[in-house]
Image (cartoon, grey):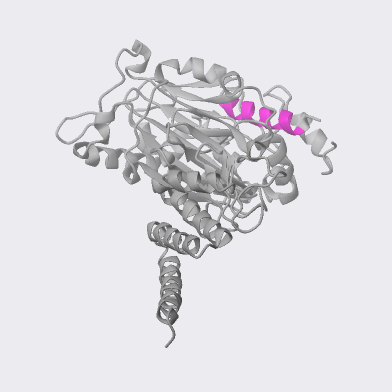
Amino acid sequence: MTLQHPDLASSLAAVIRPIGEANGLPNALYTDPALAETEHRRVFFASWAAIGFAHEVASPGDVKPVEFLGQPLLLVRDREGVLRVFLNVCRHRGMKLVHEAGNLPRAIRCPYHSWCYELSGALRTTPHVGGPGTNRHECIDRATLGLIEVRSAQWLGTVFVNLDGEAPEFDDYAAEAMARWAEFERDYHHSGADSSFTLEVKANWKLAVENYCESYHLPWVHPGLNSYSRLEDHYHIEAGGFSGQGTTVYRPMLAEDGRRFPVIPGLPEMWEEGAEYIALYPNVLLGVHKDHAFAIVLEPKGVAETQEHVAIMYPDVAVADAGFAPMREKNAAMWKEVFEEDIFVVEGMQSGRHAAGFDGGRFSPAMDGPTHAFHRWIAEKLGEV
Amino acid sequence: MADGAVPVAAAVDAHAGLDARLLEAHRAGDTPRLVALYREAADAAEKRGDADAAAFYRTHAYVFALQCGDTAADALHAELKAAGREE
């Protein structure tokens, strides 16, 4: 398939040049709804996109409907504790099955003709399908009419889906990131509302990624961090499928009474004062520290509208206790302030993308490597036939 | 009044009462109550010898039992299967 936008192919070619010569992605990819549709297929559907968090369906029977890029999806945790993602539609007439999050003890009932599905997705009954009072018919093979499962995976408390079914296995797709953060592979505990928030950003989702994965802006946009986390204390991270930054001077939050969050035992020395922040392409921003992690799922709501769903998670279940509530709230407030400080630059770049003469911009070879890596990944995805 | 008139009238009244209770349970979204009432309707239909109506009501009881996790679902399924109405 050929991209129909004038000059797009040459603009994308300019993105994949060496960083010192490259331009950023062209304006149309931030402003043109038609290209956003193309991006959905080639970038989101063809990769592993983040759609939510495992803690949103924490208990057996928990269900949560999610509309992601117009796709009606349903997160379900079955009675054995297995989390799956299905298309949120009945196999009968395509009715949307679940309209709000909740707990279903045994079955998912379609509100239209009451076809019922097990939490595992199996079709359990088809009322009156053979006429009133007869719930079977030779043409209705229940074994082939279970809910349509979407490939899904979980990592660092985040739920990913591959909507076109063609991506490599998630463990291969994210192998390098998973290997880098192998010590952080564990069950995380999320304590609910005090560790979650959503930010509304009037900007294309890619701008949030671009801003997140570089440290260049930190002293200017986050002066509060500059007092101890100086620019020279950061390093770039560039790898296959993700990029970001690390710091060598992470200082854990200290409560007024001197308490700290429990840390992951046995971490290598580098994590004593280190922390890393990566964007796993396309749409999740992750951070790990010795005492907590967070994930930001970027949900594109329009070509210039993004919801940032933030979840802060702790490796030690003790942090979920009420005694830690003030520290959890303080930690969430600290991160919220940082993420909110980024909004004006992300929205400012969105405004700038309406400047017809802007060529996508240039990159600092010294400072913008992680951002260029993301642009290049997008350009390559969009350029694939 | 002829013999039998009173029982027929009582049955009609009971049926009307059941309809009203079913509607009320639907309005309230009271699924466990719907299981009980549809089961009652199925039993009444069975007593009348109306196997189709009994299966119809039992199906509804079964569906709502599945929805709310009522343990009656297994028995209702077995009854429907025995009647050739369910897999």
Query: In the rendered image, which quarter contains the C terminus of chain A?
Result: top right
In this orientation, which residue lies closer to the viewer: A145 or A54? Answer: A145
Please provide percent x and percent y for residue B43: 45, 60
Q: Is residue A341 visible?
A: no
In this orientation, which residue lies closer to the viewer: A324 or A230? Answer: A324
Q: Furthest-front residue in view?
A: B3
Please provide percent x and percent y for residue A81: 42, 32
| Number of numbered tags placed on the structure image | 0
Indicate left or right for A62 with A175 as reference: left
Q: Is residue A174 visible?
A: yes
Q: Residue at x 41, y 76 (%)?
A: B7
Q: Main secondary structure of the magenta part?
A: helix
Res. B52 image quadrant: bottom right
Please provide percent x and percent y for residue A383: 78, 31
Q: Is residue B76 above or below residue A47?
A: below
Res. B24 image quadrant: bottom left
User: Range of the magenta residues?
Assistant: A367-382
Q: Residue at x 58, y 40 (%)?
A: A86
Please provide percent x and percent y for residue A310: 43, 41
Q: Residue at x 74, y 24 (%)?
A: A17
In this orientation, which residue lies closer to the viewer: A30 or B42? Answer: B42
In this orientation, which residue lies closer to the viewer: B65 or A29? Answer: B65
Query: In the rendered image, which quarter contains the N terminus of chain A?
Result: top right
Q: Furthest-bottom residue in view?
A: B1
Q: Residue at x 64, y 36 (%)?
A: A143
Indicate left or right for A345 with A340 as reference: right
Tell me, yes or no, whether the highlighted magenta stretch contains residue B43: no
